[in-house]
């Protein structure tokens, strides 16, 4: 009887663990693997014909605003973002960047994966207040390669395509591009949170 009970318990634990690993594997390879304080999915916001992402991030630690401010600068510098504005008394920072990304999810083990590159340029504004910070990702411009050079479209243009009800092909292309960009900024904002918190071993000052 004890053996039977043990076997049942073991089977439940094993299946639960496997399901957890499978869930994480699926989320990672579909771009939906989010962790920590950033577990909420990104939401595209609209203001007229302007599209942007914005979120308030609550900092777990009892960090002073000056410390959060400095750690944001350090993190963004490590990612080669260009600081265009910074005023600590106001608690505001603005950075810009240009990134070469890929529409398709590419795995190292699969040589059949096809590159579908594009370039994106955007700004990120960070406001530090009440021991937390808010990021706003805005002025997003996509440069899409064509036979005649790059085609320039902003995030709102792509959103309009992604919600196109007359052409499934156009909607699919728009959604694919937005999904790709959101995978990138999800990783970026998660890493930013870790850089502000500095709880991992790599941030330890003792050596």
Image (tube, rainbow, N blue to C red):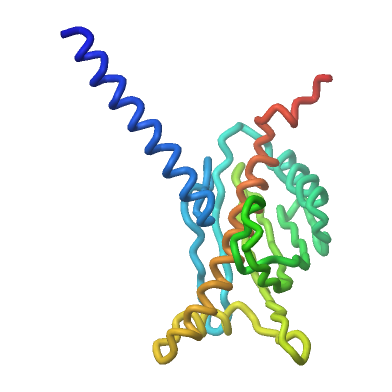
Q: Residue at x 44, y 81 (%)?
A: 163
Rendering coords of residue 130 (x, y %)? 59, 45
Check the image and name the residue furthest to the left. Answer: 1
- In the rendered structure, the answer to whether residue 41 lies left or right of residue 198 reads left
On the image, the x and y values in percent for residue 75 come to 76, 46
**Residue sitting at x 68%, y 77%:** 142
Q: Quarter-wise, where is residue 116 in the image?
A: bottom right
> Percent from the top left, x then y, of residue 141?
69, 77
Residue positioned most to the top: 2
Answer with left or right where residue 162 lies relative to residue 111: left
Q: Quadrant of the N terminus?
A: top left
Is 131 in front, or is 147? 147
24 on left or right of 109: left
- Residue 145 position, x and y percent, is 72, 82
Front-lying residue, 59 or 130: 59
The image shows a total of numbered marks equal to: 0
Which residue is depicted at the point 79% across and 56% down? 87
Q: Quadrant of the C terminus?
A: top right
- Depth check: give the residue in front, 154 or 173: 173
| Relative depth, front residue between 31 and 95 | 31
On screen, residue 58 above or below 50: above
Q: What's the residue at 54%, 72% (across, down)?
A: 176
């Amino acid at each position: 009887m004890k053996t039977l009970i043990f076997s049942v318990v073991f089977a439940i634990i094993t299946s639960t663990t496997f399901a957890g690993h499978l869930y994480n594997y699926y989320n990672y390879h579909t771009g939906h693997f989010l962790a920590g304080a950033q577990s909420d999915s990104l939401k595209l916001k609209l203001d007229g014909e302007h599209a942007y992402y914005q979120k308030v991030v609550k900092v777990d630690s009892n960090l002073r605003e000056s410390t959060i401010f400095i750690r944001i600068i350090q993190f963004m510098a490590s990612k080669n973002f260009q600081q265009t504005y910074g005023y600590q008394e106001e608690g505001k920072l603005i950075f810009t960047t240009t990134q070469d990304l890929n529409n398709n999810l590419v795995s190292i083990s699969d040589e059949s994966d096809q590159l579908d590159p594009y370039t994106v340029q955007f700004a990120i504004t960070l406001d530090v207040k009440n021991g937390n910070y808010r990021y706003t990702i805005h002025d997003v411009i996509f440069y899409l390669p064509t036979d005649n050079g790059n085609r320039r479209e902003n995030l709102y243009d792509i959103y309009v395509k992604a919600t196109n009800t007359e052409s499934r092909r156009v909607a699919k292309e728009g959604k694919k591009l937005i999904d790709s960009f959101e995978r990138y900024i999800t990783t970026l904002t998660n890493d930013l949170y870790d850089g502000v918190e500095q709880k991992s071993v790599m941030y330890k000052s003792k050596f």
